[in-house]
Image (spheres, rainbow, N blue to C red):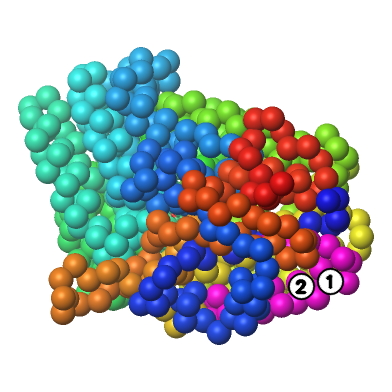
Amino acid sequence: MNKRPVILVVMDGVGINKSDFGNAVALANKPTLDKLWNECPHTQLRAHGLAVGLPSDGDMGNSEVGHNAIGCGQIYSQGAKLVNENIETKEIFESKTWKELAENAKGHKMHFIGLLSDGNVHSHINHLKALIAQAKEEGITEVRVHALLDGRDVPETSALTYVDDIESFMEGLNDDTFHACIASGGGRMQITMDRYEANWGMVEQGWHIHVMGEGRQFENATQAIETYREELGVIDQDLPGFVIAKDGQPVGTIDDGDSVILFNFRGDRAQELSLAFDGDESFDKFDRVKNPKVMYAGMLQYDADLDIPHKYLTEPPKIKYTLTEELCKHGIKEYAISETQKYGHVTYFWNGNRSEKFDESLETYVEIPSDVIPFEQRPWMKSAEITDQLIEAIESGKYDFLRTNYPNGDMVGHTGSLPATIIGVESVDLALARLIKAVDKVNGILLVTADHGNADEMYDKPKKEGALIKSKTSHTLNRVPFIVYGADVTLKQDDSLGLSNIASTVADLLGVAPNEHWNESIIEK
Ligand SMILES: O=C(O)[C@H](O)COP(=O)(O)O
Ligand SMILES: [Mn+2]
Ligand SMILES: [Mn+2]
């Protein structure tokens, strides 16, 4: 084949849903995507569950596992599954890190910070329960939970379900020798869980709330959630930070001698807090004011090359034979671009959770700064700016393989706003129309796909007839499109095909042999 360049577009969160009900993809005016789908070779790919290394087919896909699978052509057991296994076999509690942290916490406090839900994208509440129960077994007397409220990987106002669940679990363990409770928290899009340095201010706020116990005080998490909901009318991910206090005193500040575990297994939104805890005096992302001497560990190591964090409880998947590495071996020049919110998706996640380049001389990475405002207010996000630069790169003739991620379907989809998400999808469609012209100019190939669904289901299906329709902010279990423009190929139509079949397909189109470890190409030979 060997027609170059090949350009791969990931339309983040744009899945295929036969029903039009609350389907922002179907409801969008998207002439280019429709034309591509109707006139070009296309197929559907699995982007969830076992096909991307998650524990079960009930698990929706997400950006990490999706980009890992696309970028390495294989299916690896992912964090969610590895942590399950590590806890089931109890090996996690035999690890040197757990033992050190548990020993250290005796006579001090053991803190667990993380996303409190069963979304299984960044964390799982069952993992937290296992850690708390074992802390008691070890003879630790004081446990404090710093609960980040989800509403993004689970229903938008479900926080109290998880708060009630963890509180009754802790109540069942609490006695004369052991005391566990929630000490602080807040919505995950307000504090602590920033990613790719989009807004360090979120982490700084989280630091004040969790570490210093500085923030608005409440008697308990339920009171905080109910008060903020009433005052602000926002969904869980946007609830402000809160501190639980008794007689004006925070119940669980993080102090010298304590142990701290971030129980999230996914890396993007876990790195910044890890850097703040692990960082020495030279840490300059924000003024920590108080920097207690604690032992800190992550549930996983989030970036092995950069050693973030230094201590961790579960070995991450060691993703080998990535597409980037293979293409570099063939001297193929690569270009990756997205805006901040998804920049790490086309670099760090794409390359098997490595932030470093394989070959400086062959790879160019470009980041367009994202807006720091709610995306339903700017649903077009930076799609035009990404497209401007991508077109320039395509037309420069310098690159053989170019990739991008348009975040709109996903980032706007997570806000739960159907009208805004329709505009988000339409922005991506406009971008595709512009890209096609550039691809034609250089006689290249355009591949269009997605990493998982989101915009394709903006309403939760009502459980009973006549029940209130609620917005759905999370991803979906739907298949994603895979379209080839500019190459006369026949694509396989097989229900088992998934995102891990894309790497071999890209190699085929570039005229290089796919790595022997990769899953088969989608192209019929
Ligand atoms: O981190 C997030 O924004 C969501 O939990 C998952 O979205 P993503 O997998 O598309 O990044
Ligand atoms: Mn995604
Ligand atoms: Mn998402």
Which stretch is magenta?
A: 423-448
Q: Position of residue 146 (x, y in %)?
A: 31, 45
Q: Disc 2 on helix, strand or loop?
A: helix
Q: Which residue appears at 21% of the width and 28% of the height?
A: 133
Q: How many marks?
A: 2
User: Between residues 327 and 170, which one lies in front from this camera angle?
Assistant: 327
- Asked where in the image residue 459 lies, by quadrant, the reply is bottom left
**Position of residue 483 in the picture relative to residue 145 (left or right):** right
Q: Which residue appears at 38% of the width and 73% of the height?
A: 19
Confirm if mark 2 falls within 8 A of ligand 2: no
Residue 440, which numbered label? 1
Q: Position of residue 123 (x, y in %)?
A: 37, 43
Q: Main secondary structure of the magenta part?
A: helix
Q: Which residue appears at 33% of the width and 61% of the height?
A: 151
Binning the other alpha carbons within 10 Å of mark 1 as few (below 14), some (14 to 19) or many (20 upward) gives few
Q: Disc 1 on helix, strand or loop?
A: helix
Judge whether residue 444 is colored magenta: yes
**Position of residue 437 in the picture relative to residue 280 (left or right):** right
Q: Which residue appears at 40% of the width and 17% of the height?
A: 95
Binning the other alpha carbons within 10 Å of mark 2 as few (below 14), some (14 to 19) or many (20 upward) gives some
User: Between residues 408 and 273, which one lies in front from this camera angle?
Assistant: 408
Q: Measured along the vertical axis of the image, is residue 67 above or below residue 53?
A: below
Q: Are marks 2 and 1 in contact (CB under 8 Å)?
A: yes
Inter-mark Cα distance, 2 to 1: 6 Å
Judge whether residue 235 is colored magenta: no
Residue 436, which numbered label? 2
Residue type at the position of mark 2: Ile
Residue type at the position of mark 1: Asp
